[in-house]
Image (cartoon, helix red, strand yellow):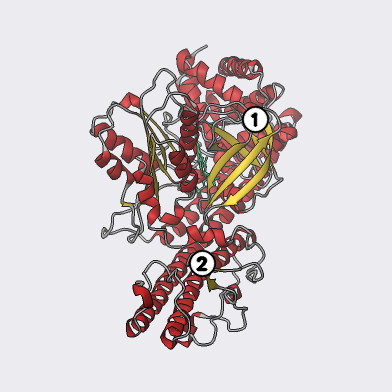
Amino acid sequence: MDIQRMRDSFEVVGANGDEVPLFFYSHLFLNYPETRSLFPVSMMTQRDRLFAALGHIVTNVDNVDVLVPFLQDLGRDHRKFGTLAGHYPAVGASLLATLEHFAGDAWTPELAADWAEAYGVIASVMTEAAGQSDDPAWWDARVVSHERRTLDIAVVRLEPRERLDFVPGQAVAVESELRPRLWRYYAVANAPREDNVLELHVQAHDGGPVSSALVRHLAVGDAVRLGPPQGGLVLDTTSDRDLLLVASGTGVAPLKAILEQVTQDDVARRVDFYVEARTAADLYDLESLQALARAHPWVTVVPVVSDEDDYPGEKGRVSDVVVRDGPWGSRDVFVCGAPLMVDETVKELIKAGVPEHRIRAERFAPSRPGPSAEGSLTS
Amino acid sequence: MTTPTNSVPDHQEWARRLSPADVHSVLFGRSGLGRRGYDVTEVDVFLERVQVELTRLIREKGELRDEVIRLKEQVSSPDGEGGGERRDAASLQAVRVLSAAQQTADQYVADAEQYSRRVTSDARQHAEELVEEARVRAKAIVEQAERLALEASAAAPAPNGAPALPSGAPAAEPVAAGTDSAQAKQELEEQVAYLRAFGQVTRVQLRAYLEALLRDVELEWGRAQPQAVSALPALPAGLNGTAALARDPLAKDPLANARPSADGHAVVDLSDQAPSAPAGATAATSVEDASDAGVPEPGRPDEARSSR
Ligand SMILES: Cc1cc2nc3c(=O)[nH]c(=O)nc-3n(C[C@H](O)[C@H](O)[C@H](O)COP(=O)(O)OP(=O)(O)OC[C@H]3O[C@@H](n4cnc5c(N)ncnc54)[C@H](O)[C@@H]3O)c2cc1C
């Protein structure tokens, strides 16, 4: 396999931008119409994703340590989209046709053979990883309750038909019939329960198709599909340090799951939970957090309101309040919520002496990482 | 090949051409307060045009590429032999047609999202202004009532030295009935209770209306129904000074049964006054919601801290 030649050809092809994935998907859907239903109506974002993934693969094609785990994740992750092993040859055929179409004179039988071989390896790593899992490809679940807590936030409880095991702090990808084929991650807001019910906290974003639908249109009895739990915002099982939790908006969800888990353990760990919201009315889950604090004297909940002058409690940015109340050098720290808040808090805590490796953070970024004005991806 | 939602590689390793999706979801930093910056709506409108134009250029480029391929074939086999190649060209054309259809679909979805974004954020801004207005008015009413009550009780000192109307709640102890001043005081207390409840109901109903508005916006692309505001309660006769608040004098008085209860809080029965809000005013809007629609209870945050 001549890797340099493959990279060069991909660069030539890639110079055609959006035209390339557009051609690829049209070719795929024409020749294998059954694949169309695996994708959403709008393919705009999907095309960028294809490019990003291909670019990542081509960049790391000689770096097995990076490439193999990436492909394995990709393969496992694709199960929930309904991808079957039988789809892989179809994709390979359309990929080769696309490369040929755009490579022009650079396309030679040798190059074609290299790409075919490379794709074969990619497909086998992906299908193998997908085949190894005993979990269902996705979980069918039903909405058992839907509460609008504010204009833009809903607390949704789901009951998966089959047991869905997760670690507190993890998120599941959600697809609703209201917005077919659009998957978005939402953190589970409770520790695992006997009855298997999962609580999600969803914040509607203006113009955000999935979040708006989940907040404004989802109703009790509706069906949703869930992907396998993901994410590393989980307790370090080797540590029994006290905890500092910092959340803004629906970033409360995964941290509440962690808090629940800690309160169920035998060892009492001190927990300080700072919750930021714009206004007091946006502190949509304060009561259940305060109930936990009342039941466990070593748990403290501090609401912080950033945008309401006559609020009687803590006002301002949560990062400032947290740092002021420190030092937190001996704590395990979890930060979750709006990207700006997370970045700021992590930065300030490190500056204030918290070792970076004790901080775990998750940014609730939009599903489509919009490029910044200079063109770099922001999330 | 598809790639998973929300799990695109973090950093971009491959110099990639600008795509319509990039233009659709580009993020600009906000300029700081007092700094100069462009008008957000104008930038959005322009970006939309750029995206449409980019999409069109990509399509035209593809069509030209097909044309080149077709012409090349004509040149290399003028008498039209080589049926295999012609079939290829035909399927290329099919790919192009499907691509154009896909781009049209993408554009519809992008337009709908853009529209929904604009209308919901406008609605929200409007909502926040209304709520703020209601809050200020409700506060003014309560202050006025409390002042009246204070004046009245100052004129006729309460028996057994009970403090006149603590600012938190109407007097909890029933005053000895019989004397004129005591009666006047009781009436005033009832009015204060009424006004407190009124302030709360106003907020609850505004919220119902605004929720319905947002829902409407999402469902039907923003046919707001201003008549829903008429769901605001009317004031009873005798409180003329604040009658301006009642937008629709025909609406039922939701507070007909509101009377100070033993614990000093007004009891409001909202059960029979479903606001005539547009379809979708959710049942979630109940008296309970008043707690997060209204002014925060002063005790709450401190309570949280004190458990430290
Ligand atoms: C691991 C993980 C866990 C998550 N957990 C939660 C959770 O528990 N609760 C929750 O509410 N969300 C959570 N999110 C975010 C969630 O996955 C979606 O990204 C979000 O709901 C937006 O989806 P959408 O389809 O409505 O909008 P998208 O299609 O993603 O975005 C469309 C447009 O909406 C706007 N928008 C979307 N998201 C944001 C944002 N964060 N800030 C500003 N504007 C935005 C932007 O204009 C964007 O271009 C999580 C994300 C990740 C990665």
Q: Amino acid at mark 2?
A: Ala
Residue A357 in the figure: left or right of residue A78 = left
Q: Residue at x 31, y 40 (%)?
A: A344
Vertical comparison of A32 with B234: above or below? above
Vertical comparison of A129 with B211: above or below? above
Evaluate whether residue B89 shows in this view.
no
Q: Which residue is mark 1?
A: A80
Q: Amino acid at mark 1?
A: Lys
Residue B272 in the figure: left or right of residue B133 = right
As drawn, the label of residue A293 is none
Q: Residue at x 56, y 73 (%)?
A: B258
- Please state which of residues A31 and B42 is positioned toward the viewer in this rendering: B42
Chain letter for mark 1: A
> In the rendered image, which quarter is residue B73 located in?
top right
Query: Pointer 2: residues within 10 angstroms few (<14), some, or many (20+)?
Result: few
Residue A137 in percent (x, y) is at 67, 26
Residue B299 in the figure: left or right of residue B198 = left
Residue B188 in the figure: left or right of residue A105 = left
Vertical comparison of A78 with A379: above or below? above
Compute the Cα span from label 2 to label 1.
58 Å
Residue A93 in percent (x, y) is at 66, 24
Residue B116 in percent (x, y) is at 55, 57
